[in-house]
Amino acid sequence: MAETFDLIVKNGECVTPAGRQSFDLGIRDGRIIGMGDLSEDKAAETFDAKGLTVLPGVIDSQVHFREPGLEHKEDLESGTRAAILGGVTCVFEMPNTNPSTTTIEAFNDKLRRAEGRTWTDHAFFIGASPDNVENLGFLEKQPGCAGVKIFMGSSTGSLLVDDEEALKLALENGHRRVAVHCEDEERLKERRSLIEGINDPAMHPVWRDEKTALRATHKLIRYARTTGRRVHVLHVTTAEEMKFLSLHKEIATVEVTPQHLTLAAPSCYMELGSRAQMNPPVRVERHREALWRGVATGIVDVVGSDHAPHTLEEKAKPYPNSPSGMPGVQTLLPVLLGHLSTGRLSLERLVDLTSAGPARIYGIAGKGRIALGYDGDLTLVDLEATRRISDSDMATKSGWTPFHDMEVKGWPVATIVRGQIVMRDGQTVGDPIGQPVRFQETLAGAQARL
Ligand code: DOR
């Protein structure tokens, strides 16, 4: 008997857990309920994906959208609009806003602000601070919460857990995987004098050197072992951390960014100046190659953009007063597709890093693969399209990208969130329909949908 769907995506080559398969996908009430030849079935809308590759919706599990408090850099609407234009269907937003997301009130405020204004599905991290460590086990259980984020070294904003007792308490309070920024605050302070009065962003990886990152990562893993807590090490930047983390995969998962996989010192600082400044820093070629080895050998679980917009005016301040961070949510997938076209990674690995990986490590319910019963989140790409990434196409309020002028082969041409087409050929479609992400460990949101 013919079925009726809300949307049929037909004739695409779908990247599924069983491999690449050419078939139609039928979505109803936000979920994939038909896979195969659906030519006899009916749908309110049909998308002909002939010649296109259909990926599970890309999940960017590390973005900074600046709302509340710093909306001149970004807000939830502009950040998620940039995301869908880049093929991203789901984002996890970081807690270093103003105020920081450290309380139930600040967390609920973000969820309220997101209602009717996000183009992607969304989850928010709770920031750990010495003031809320005892409460983290409660906070991480809130529906729509991605988990806890710890800054071991100071970066943008005021969030910091730099003493060992607070770190231990933060890891003891709660169960879900904790996302961690690993830079050692004490060493950052010791070495800060190296950059005083030297207006040169190329000094950034000298100040925040390899040992700064490695020391924090060692400390984190030591406490993760003693407390039995799973951790996720964000934006790993050194060969030494990659090797070390490969020995601790039972408790530690690993993330890298497109910036660290693509740029390298010193050329990035010569070409981009403080636009290439981020924490932890972009380092020399040896480290970039080690990150790629981590991708090739399976150490890396996730690629996240660490979308961290700052205006060009702010970036133009003399280093080190220039803020750290680069926009990236819109270029995450295009840059990775560029690497795919040059043979740096396979399509299957790309999907593992951008959807299956985040779903696996954070326990997302119903996302991360093209499978029956899963959310109808799809990213349609044209692997043959050659395009140039350009500042002028960026939807971020900051209005620039470190990848300006880079030519890539492979481009997202449509973004579908729970069966609704929200981007087609570089244009938004309809209204922002984003909803909180559901997690396996806090399924309250899912119950409400049944
Ligand atoms: O470079 C960075 N910028 N690293 C971070 O950890 C924070 C981010 C931001 O929020 O600007």
Image: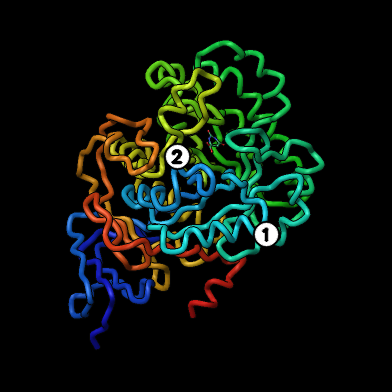
Q: Is residue 318 above or below residue 426?
A: above
Residue 54 in the image, given as x and y percentages of width and height: 29, 57
Judged from the image, the secondary structure of the residue bearing numbered disc 1 is helix
Q: In terms of sequence position, does the residue under pointer 1 or pointer 2 come before the other? A: 2
Q: Amino acid at mark 1?
A: Leu
Residue 176 in the image, given as x and y percentages of width and height: 65, 57
Residue 362 in view in this figure: yes
Marks 1/2: CA–CA distance:
27 Å
Q: Is mark 2 within 8 Å of ligand 1?
A: no
Instruction: Kindly give the residue lying farthest to the right in the view shown.
Output: 165
442 with respect to 261 (left or right): right
Residue 281 in the image, given as x and y percentages of width and height: 53, 27
Q: Amino acid at mark 2?
A: Lys
Judged from the image, the secondary structure of the residue bearing numbered disc 2 is loop
Q: Which residue is mark 2?
A: 73
Task: Find residue 333 and report its image quarter.
Answer: top left
The N terminus lies in quadrant: bottom left
Picture residue at 35% right of the left edge, 38% below the top: 335
Picture residue at 51% right of the left edge, 24% below the top: 322
Q: Quick check: which quadrant has ligand 1?
A: top right
Which coloring applies here?
A: rainbow
Residue 250 in view in this figure: no
Residue 334 in the image, given as x and y percentages of width and height: 32, 42
Per the rendering, the mark at residue 139 is 1
Q: Is residue 159 above or below residue 141?
A: above
